[in-house]
Image (spheres, rainbow, N blue to C red):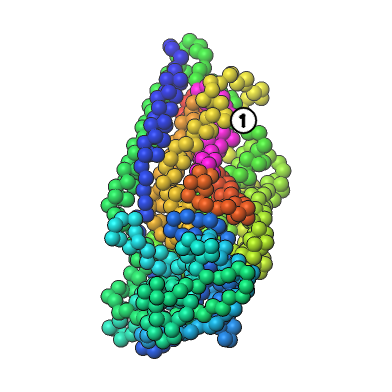
Amino acid sequence: MTRPSCSRIAKMAFLGLASTCLLSLQHHSSLVQAFYLPGVAPHEYENGDAVPLMVNALTPGSDSELKSVIPFDYYDPQFAFCEPKEGEKAQAESLGSILFGDRIWTSPYEINMNTRVNCKRLCDINVSAAQAQFINARIRENYAVNWLVDGLPAGHVRPGREPNTEVYSIGFPLGEEDGRATPRLNNHYEISIDYHHNTQKDTLRVVGIVVQPMSIATPVIGEVECGAIEAEQSPSVYLDEKKVNAVTYTYSVQWNQVETAWATRWDKYLLVGEPRIHWFSLVNSIIIVLFLTGMVAMILLRALHKDISRYNQLEAQEDFQEDFGWKLVHGDVFRAPSFPMLFSIIVGNGSQMFLMASVTIIFAALGFLSPSNRGSLATVMIVFYMFFGIVAGFISARMYKMFGGEAWKGNVIGTAFLFPSIVFGGFVALNFFLINANSSGAVPFGTMLGVVALWFLVSVPLSVIGSYLGFQRPKIDNPVRANQIPRQIPDQVFYLRPIPSMMIGGILPFGAIFIELYFILNSIWFHKIYYVFGFLFLVFGILILTCAEVTILMCYFHLCAEDYHWWWRAFFTSGASAFYIFLYSVMYYFSTLQIRSFTSMVLYFGWTAIMSMLFFVLSGAIGFFSTFLFVRRIYGSIKID
């Protein structure tokens, strides 16, 4: 009987992995349309009814480049915006909305349904030299003003990439640079509001708002566009950074009756061009990844079937035959890993992250997390993470008991506090940078206490309950007992050594998600609405398949090479895709963003590191549990004396 060649199978599989990575990197996709449920009842207006205009934090970014990641409160004294006579009032917001930097206030703008306004004076402001320096700096960093009318964000229309096309973008510029020493400030706003006539109730509904900002130094009150029909007819507003500047803020309102239904009023924010090309790219990428991962699985299953049949035939023969291949390490494969306490804690927290992400994506794909519910996505993620603490405790306790651990108190405390403390510590540290920058993105102290209360009053008790249930269950029995004396591991070829094998294994899961990762990064840093959860659901499914198959394949190669240290390696093989995500984020920073300030750089890389760490434990848990079931299955299928 000849010894089975694992190296030949390994070469075939690695060729498959390399081909998958090269082919998947050749295909790019863009946003695709998705179905969603609005989630908010329409507000019915009559002619002349007051239509409140709310203001939100000013955010950095433009349609082409990003120079900062620090949002500022609309009523920050340095902006010198007009304030309501009775004082601004904060609006109630969800937990997720606050954590993502929304700060919504009332405004002095007086808007009435279907009532036209021509160049109405809002207020006269004296802008000091220090304020002028701050405003000019924000204009150079492409800051945008954000308003809300009837829950809809105000936007502006800009030219599209294709000729004779227009694109709808959320927010509108604070000002523009026109080649002079100082940029011009937009002090007049042409507000165009679309409304739909509901014939059933004979009421009016707001279905769109577009703002055209203008810079007019000497506005003519009551005239159309304040007397500046052409931009050259009136000088613009330029803030001198060495003296006090007088600025008059004005606005006009016009109403347009349209046929757009209230249920589809968000479509203009979500519209993409050439959807057929995007769908083709999506389907093509999915087919390539599924086909090649299926090929890897087929190779593995064929080799395993032959191995198991051969081993069982040898057991039936009378002549003694020495074990070989992965059966040779049957007495060591279920030996407890190094640092079993830490390993069980990380696996438990990874299970918690996986369930949180899975349930959230399913809810979003079904349409329950509409963009009209501001902050709903982040709120749901936090709530699910807290409630799935019971799963983290249960899994961690079961794993630790299987390893023979006796320090159960340390396991319970570590599961409830270790990983969440690292994430929360990074969150608090980055929050101090936002506080130092006087940013509205800094989470208020009360909200911070609320998050801590959720952690200690919901997540920790549930984690403790899960640990108690896990320790009460009987110990998991392995198919094969571990020998008392560990077997010596022979020297491994280069690609089967720990770091190279982990780096190779992490490429394919990253290749399955990197297209979607680009749009997620755009959504986060450019403050765009992300809504293609149907696409994300498919990508997440592909991620689970690739993590499972690649990790199982690498584990099989290691066992064939008589290396039985698979516990940590299974976790790190699929978790290594987080390393590529961080590298991709670094490339994204230098290729797409134009950030120059130290605070913005720290915030970007800090949040990127936290997101990469969260993805590491999530994908690592997928790889480990797949490999755990695989190893138990193959060693339970052979006869061992």
What secondary structure is found at the residue carrying circle 1? loop
The quadrant of the image that shows the C terminus is top right
- As rendered, which of 522 and 597 lies closer to the eye? 597
Region rendered in magenta? 558-584
- As rendered, which of 8 and 153 lies closer to the eye? 153
Residue located at (34% from left, 55% from top) = 161
- As rendered, which of 459 and 514 lies closer to the eye? 514
Q: In the rendered image, is residue 297 in sight?
A: no
Image quadrant in which you'd find residue 120? bottom left
Question: Does residue 559 belong to the magenta stretch?
Answer: yes
Question: From the viewer's perspective, is 238 left or right of 468?
Answer: left
Q: From this viewpoint, which residue is outermost toward the bottom?
A: 48
Up-down: is 76 above or below 70?
A: below
Q: Position of residue 32 (x, y in %)?
A: 34, 55
- As rendered, which of 560 and 216 lies closer to the eye? 216
Q: Most prominent secondary structure in the magenta stretch?
A: helix
Q: Position of residue 247 (x, y in %)?
A: 54, 78
The quadrant of the image that shows the N terminus is top left
Question: Does residue 343 belong to the magenta stretch?
Answer: no
Residue bearing the label numbered 1: 335
Up-down: is 90 above or below 139?
A: below
Q: Position of residue 345 (x, y in %)?
A: 63, 45
Residue located at (55% from left, 58% from top) = 69
